[in-house]
Amino acid sequence: MAETKRNWREDVKVFRDRMGGLTEAKKAMAKDQRDTIKAIQAALKAGPRTVPEISAETKIASQKVLWYIMALKRYGKVAEAGQAGEYFRYELKEASS
Amino acid sequence: MAKIKERYDGLVVGGGIAGMQAALDLAGQGYGVLLVEREPSIGGVMVGLNKVFPTLDCSSCICTPRMAETAHHDRITVQAYTEVDEVRREGDGFAVRLIKKPRYVVEEDCIGCSKCELACTMLAPHEFDHGLGARAAIYIPHGNAIPQLPVLDPEYCIFDGTCARACPTDCIDFTQLPEEVNIEVGAVIIATGLKTTPMDAKKEYGGGKYVNVMNPLAMERVQSPNGPYGHVLRPSDGKLAQSVAYVQCAGSRDKSIGVPYCSRVCCMYALKQAIMIKHHRHETDVTIYHMDIRAFGKGYEQFYRRALAEGVKVVKAKVARITEEPNRDLTLRVELIDEGGRVAEKRHDLVVLSQGTIPGWRPDGRALAQVDDDGFFQIRDVVTRPANSSDDGIFVAGVATGPKDIPDSIVEAGAAAMEAAMYLDRTRGRRQALAGAGVEA
């Protein structure tokens, strides 16, 4: 265990500058990620959906929807909920207390 | 992880199956070994595979115990996320300069709890899943990673300190820089593995352009229970694959892209993956388009027969080009060799290109050993000294010398370790070498 508390608040500023700062492109990427996750979660609030169904509702490309669904599944926020023909359905997982 | 000492009997470059085996076999003879791996975890390509052929054993179930044995061996120091920058001869041994890349995590303090990863709000394509899945900007490479330590990817970091705030041991260190480490070693074993030819090496196949044209190593992850999908889905829309095609020699035996040799493992992994697709879902149609099936190892011909018996279609054909349909299906224009060269169009919803095997690392002057025109390390005498490089004291194992399968890589790693041990005995005497490793003779 570290003996002295790291001053990460100062360190992260130096790190940010060393890495070229928080660029507009990176800000846009972060916003796009937040918006996409929000849109997918909103679609799933109405019930289990397949990737093409989410894509049709959100107007987000199905390839991108799949990638985010798998990310949300990996981090325990989405789960499989049966099959609809050739596609799996996905549903929101209730947050564990 | 143990601190790096200034001196080791042997340096093993590459922490895949060949490198780990070489390190274990050299350490087992009493020598002190430093194993250097450029990725954040040891395990190499094998730990990402689903099954091995021809036994269909779980690949990571074989590989992870070997990883643990390597990492916990008294005479092996594992240094992951570190590159070899220079190998310079000094007498009978070598002076080696390593560059330890920053994880931005204090290794000694981290307890591998993943709280940083779970708190991080940024996602990035996961390298271990060939981009098909996602990971956070700070992440532990995979569930079986050794060491179980996260690495921060500055490219996706938004510098908000979320990870540092979540860390219970205060081990996120944004001040880390690449660190130069200089060591002396008595012998070197190079086991730097493989890469596949670029996806777009053959433009007519649409790799890198059509999302449902896939790399075979990505397909390994797709088939793995701990892979990105958990099922054989196509990446364009998550549809369960109904019809999968394998295009063989899509980057081997092809002078036009500088890979004139056979990659030796593609026929077998294509057969293996085809069988596994059938095991996932028997109704899925799987067709392997090939020039000829090269099933040359022990039990390999029987494995080929098994694939046929399980309903895999094996068609002697040359694929001329692949085009994408509006629904992302793929149409293959093929010349059917067994039908007198008749040209036909075949539609599939997922295509795997059996890409060529190329060297995983090119020394570019950083190591003394010479490479051949194809980029693989030269062997001094292919018949009688298959583990000896062009230079005394430098030995080679696994795919670093040319394409080969896992059993052959392991055999060669043992040979390289034995040659390295004999070299150490010859140059310094066994007693002195053992003293260097901190072991009494």
Image (spheres, coloured by chain):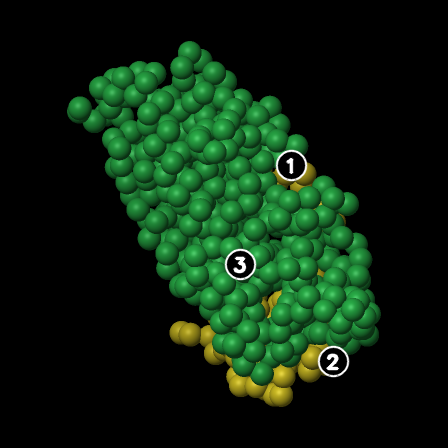
Residue type of the residue flagged with mark 3: Ala
The residue carrying pointer 2 sits among few (fewer than 14), some (14 to 19) or many (20 or more) residues within 10 Å by Cα, namely: few
Say which residue label 3 marks: B295
Chain coloured yellow: A
Screen quadrant of the C terminus of chain B: top left
Which-is-in-front pick, marks 3 and 2?
3
- Give coordinates of residue B293: x percent, y percent: 60, 60
The answer to which image quadrant residue B85 occupies is top right
Screen quadrant of the N terminus of chain B: top left
In this picture, residue B383 sits left or right of residue B326? left
**Above or below, B21 relative to B421:** below
Mark 3 or mark 1, which has the lower sequence index? 3
The answer to which image quadrant residue B323 occupies is bottom right
**Above or below, A82 relative to B278:** below
Discs 1 and 2 lie in a common subunit? no
Residue type of the residue flagged with mark 2: Ala
- Cα distance between the residues tagged 3 and 2: 46 Å
Say which residue label 1 marks: B374
- Cα distance between the residues tagged 3 and 1: 23 Å
Q: Nearer the viewer, residue B336 or B417?
A: B336
**Above or below, B12 relative to B250:** above
Say which residue label 2 marks: A56
Tag 3 secondary structure:
loop
Tag 1 secondary structure:
loop
Tag 2 secondary structure:
helix
The reply to whether callout 3 and callout 1 are in contact (CB within 8 Å) is no
- Give coordinates of residue B279: x percent, y percent: 49, 76
